[in-house]
Every structure is written in C-alpha cells, then in structure tokens.
Image (cartoon, grey):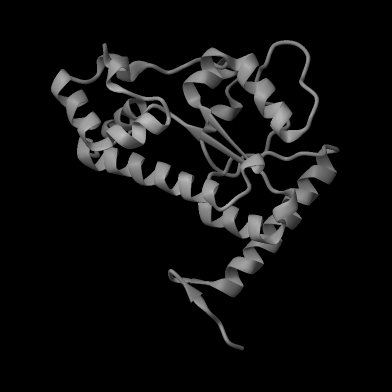
Amino acid sequence: EMCIRDRGRSVLDMARTGRDSADILDAVAAEAGCRVVVDASKHMPRFRALQATAPERTRLILLCRDYRGVIYSKMKRGRSLEDSAVSWANRVDRMAHLARRMPADRVIKLRYEDLCEHTDATLLRVFDFLGVAPTDGPVRRTSHGMHHIGGSPSKFDDERAEIIIDERHKDAFSPQELDRMHEILGPQAAVWGYGPEQNA
C-alpha cells in the first residue's frame, strides 16, 4: 500500500486521525445529549485532520492571549524571553494559517482578556457563531461530570470555577524587557490588538 508523507506524517494516518476524532466527538455528543461539542485540546494537526474529514461540521475558535502573559508563564518554567516570544509568534502564525484555510464564516477570533473581562458579550458571540441558544444565569465552569484528557487539573477545582483574568505579568517585566518583546513581536501582536501602549 502506497503511503504519502507530509512533513513527517503519513497522509493515511492523518485521514485515520480525522475519522477517529469525528467518531469520538459524535460519541461525546450522543452521550451528553448535545448538538455541539467544543474540543479545547488545541492540537493543530488533529484539528486539520478533523476539518478535512468533516469540513461541513467543523468550526474554528481561535483564542489568543496577550504575549506578555504567555511569555511570563514560559519564563517561570525556565525559558528565555526571546525563546518564549518566538514560541508565541510561531503559535499565532499557525493559528492564522489554520484560519486562512477555512471559510471566514467558520472561524471566530477571541482574546483571552475579552473573555475574562467581557464574558457575557464574548460568549454571546460564540453562541451566535455556533448557532446555539445562550445560557441563562451567570457563567460558571462546573467541575462535576467532567472527564479529563489533557490540560490543567484546575478543571476539577471548585474554588476556581469563576472566570477571573490572570494579570500577574503586568508587574513582572522591566521597560527594557517590554521593549525587547515588542521589537520581536510588534506586527504580529498588533494583529490581535496588543501594543506597547498597554505597558503604560
């Protein structure tokens, strides 16, 4: 059987990944009794495989966070400023590439800060984008009945159910460090509305 390689991945393997992903999400929807499943796994190759398998049923939600918050988080884990900045740039480049490959009406772009500070308005955009009715009452993340595949274990922490913005990065950098970040990321950051004026 002939197997075509694409950037080190088998095209046949990716097709299988797309079919398996669609089957899993269909099973989740059936078990939960819902029409829409939001997969927050953030694995871009798997998303591309899923979108190729079921393009008419796939939507893309892009969520971006201020590069300063991301760089702060990475530097706490031992990465350099420059390496962390380039990592953010590479991620948003891949996000933009995904968006360009899809019809505009199947893509929505959100900012982490807007989701935290203007939760109701931002979620109304998401509900409208997905074609589902808005929820009633305040938005809270339940920690019950959840199945953890990956990501933060805070999903199970009842004390962290509120949507609260994390702005610890705001006092973490010197002016020189902020200037260096903007030097590296200026044009890409501006696309998402992040600029040096937010450092003031």
Q: In the figure, 44 relative to 141: above or below?
A: below
Q: Residue shown at 55%/43% (left/top)?
A: 150
Measured as percent of width and height from the top left, residue 110 is found at 54, 29
Q: Which image quadrant: the C terminus? A: top left
Q: In the figure, 28 relative to 158: above or below?
A: below
Tell me if residue 43 can be seen: no
Task: Determine whether, in the image, residue 5 is placed left or right of residue 30.
Answer: left
Q: In the figure, 81 relative to 118: above or below?
A: below
Residue 158's quadrant in the figure? Answer: top right
Q: Residue shown at 66%/17% (left/top)?
A: 140
Measured as percent of width and height from the top left, residue 144 is found at 70, 27
Q: Residue shown at 39%/26% (left/top)?
A: 66
Measured as percent of width and height from the top left, residue 111 is found at 49, 26
Residue 28's quadrant in the figure? Answer: top right
Q: In the figure, 57 relative to 71: above or below?
A: below
Task: Determine whether, in the image, residue 64 is placed left or right of residue 128.
Answer: left
Q: Residue shown at 80%/25% (left/top)?
A: 133
Q: Nearer the viewer, residue 7 or 193?
A: 193
Q: Residue furthest left?
A: 176
Measured as percent of width and height from the top left, residue 163 is found at 56, 17
Tell me if residue 119 can be seen: yes
Q: What is the number of callouts on the image?
A: 0
